[in-house]
């Protein structure tokens, strides 16, 4: 893979000059199949952050997990045992995170999540070497429930895929939504035909729909929902209304409100510079996944500025301090190493030929997660 060959070449150059790559990062992410767009964005945001740091002592090895837990476990074992990485990152999907993170941290490796934030790793399963730079899975869905209240929705039909993040999604929405549920269903992970689910929505008597279907699943659902004639307002998390998804869905998404901890119009210098440099580097607008990858790289670079990764206690303290300029503005970790952050309501709009989002308000301010109290570190 391109980035792996670049990293190896950089190491050879350092050896020739008598120096060594001091920090080795292993990125396991999804670069093929239905969820590839998410992994590509995380990878590209992360590598942009490393490039902008100007450091030549960080080596990044990148592998494709193919969205398969067994492949992710094999890659993690190889990176830890053979590649001798210091830090692991990159996983998109919560079922893969659950397969990899506990074993990696048990072997003394740091894991920094740029995406997946399963509840099992935020509460009793937390670990001092595990940091989530994105969110705890429930957070954006909790914000969607809070927004639905302000929008006057009182009888939502809710659906999500049957895997850890899907269960966290519906749990999060229900935690903050004050109305009734017209229906609650779990779909198959990777499902593309939603005719049966849309028929249930039509017959349910719902006044609104909340769904969490990331990647290609969201594209399929939104297109079929728009074609169905069902005219109920939709609320969802950013994962179903992100930059890549919106271009595939098109006008059917216009006006839908979704929740996110990031958007390209968050007004701070770090975010403006990130958006501009990402477009210049890759020729496309960044997504929230790209912003999370970028912030993860920024966190690593900031921690290395004050501690060597071989001094685990000092490096851990440097990570906890989170002294970097986040694309989100102020950034801080809670006691379980998950972010405390503001989550916004965004509306899908069209700018020229591009479908994108704009912030219309705050859904939850300085929000933590529901599992921190169960974390004993």
Image (cartoon, rainbow, N blue to C red):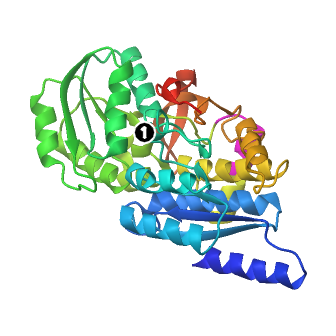
Residue 258 in view: no
Query: Which residues are the magenta region?
Result: 266-274
Quarter of the image where the C terminus is located: top right
Quarter of the image where the N terminus is located: bottom right
Image spot of residue 261 (x, y percent):
56, 35
Q: Is residue 15 left or right of residue 207?
A: right
Q: Residue furthest front?
A: 107
Residue 142 in view: yes
Image spot of residue 274 (x, y percent):
70, 50
Q: Is residue 319 left or right of residue 140?
A: right
Q: Is residue 40 magenta?
A: no
SS for dot 1: helix
Q: Is residue 179 left or right of residue 112?
A: left
Image spot of residue 3 (x, y percent):
64, 74
Image spot of residue 218 (x, y percent):
33, 49
Quadrant of residue 23 within the rendered picture:
bottom right
Tell me the residue at 78%/59% (across/down): 52
Q: Nearer the viewer, residue 124 or 91?
A: 124
Q: Residue furthest right?
A: 17
Tell me the residue at 30%/47% (across/down): 163
Residue under label 1, please give it.
120
State whether the magenta stretch is mostly helix, strand or loop: helix
Tell me the residue at 47%/57% (across/down): 100
Q: Nearer the viewer, residue 275 or 340?
A: 340
Quadrant of residue 43 within the rendered picture:
bottom right
């Amino acid at each position: 893979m391109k980035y792996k060959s670049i990293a190896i070449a950089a190491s050879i150059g350092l050896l020739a000059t008598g120096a060594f790559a001091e920090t080795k990062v292993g990125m396991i992410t999804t670069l093929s199949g239905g969820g590839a767009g998410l992994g590509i964005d995380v990878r590209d945001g992360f590598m942009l952050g490393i490039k902008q740091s100007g450091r030549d002592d960080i080596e990044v090895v990148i592998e494709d997990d193919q969205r398969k837990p067994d492949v992710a476990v094999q890659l993690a074992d190889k990176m830890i045992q053979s590649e001798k990485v210091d830090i692991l990152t990159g996983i998109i999907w919560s079922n893969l995170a659950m397969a990899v993170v506990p074993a990696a941290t048990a072997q003394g490796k740091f894991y920094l999540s740029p995406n997946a934030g399963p509840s099992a790793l935020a509460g009793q399963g937390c670990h001092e070497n595990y940091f989530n730079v994105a969110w705890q899975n429930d957070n954006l869905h909790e914000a969607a429930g809070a927004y639905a209240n302000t929008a006057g929705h009182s009888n939502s039909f809710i659906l999500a895929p049957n895997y850890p993040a899907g269960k966290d999604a519906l749990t999060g929405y229900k935690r903050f939504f004050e109305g009734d549920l017209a229906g609650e269903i779990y779909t198959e992970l990777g499902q593309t035909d939603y005719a049966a689910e849309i028929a249930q929505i039509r017959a349910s008597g719902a006044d609104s729909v909340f769904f969490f279907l990331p990647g290609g699943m969201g594209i399929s659902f939104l297109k079929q929902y728009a074609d169905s004639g069902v005219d109920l307002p939709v609320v969802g998390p950013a994962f179903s209304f992100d930059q890549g998804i919106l271009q595939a869905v098109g006008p059917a998404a216009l006006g839908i409100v979704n929740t996110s901890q990031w958007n390209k119009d968050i007004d701070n210098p770090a975010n403006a510079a990130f958006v501009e440099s990402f477009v210049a580097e890759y020729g496309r607008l960044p997504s929230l996944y790209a912003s999370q990858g970028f912030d993860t790289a920024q966190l690593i670079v900031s921690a290395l500025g004050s501690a060597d990764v071989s001094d685990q206690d000092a490096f851990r303290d440097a990570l906890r301090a989170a002294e970097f300029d986040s694309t989100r503005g102020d950034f801080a970790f809670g006691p379980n190493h998950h972010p405390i952050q503001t989550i916004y309501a965004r509306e899908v709009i069209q700018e020229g030929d591009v479908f994108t989002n704009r912030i219309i308000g705050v859904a939850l301010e300085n929000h933590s997660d529901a599992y921190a109290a169960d974390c004993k570190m």
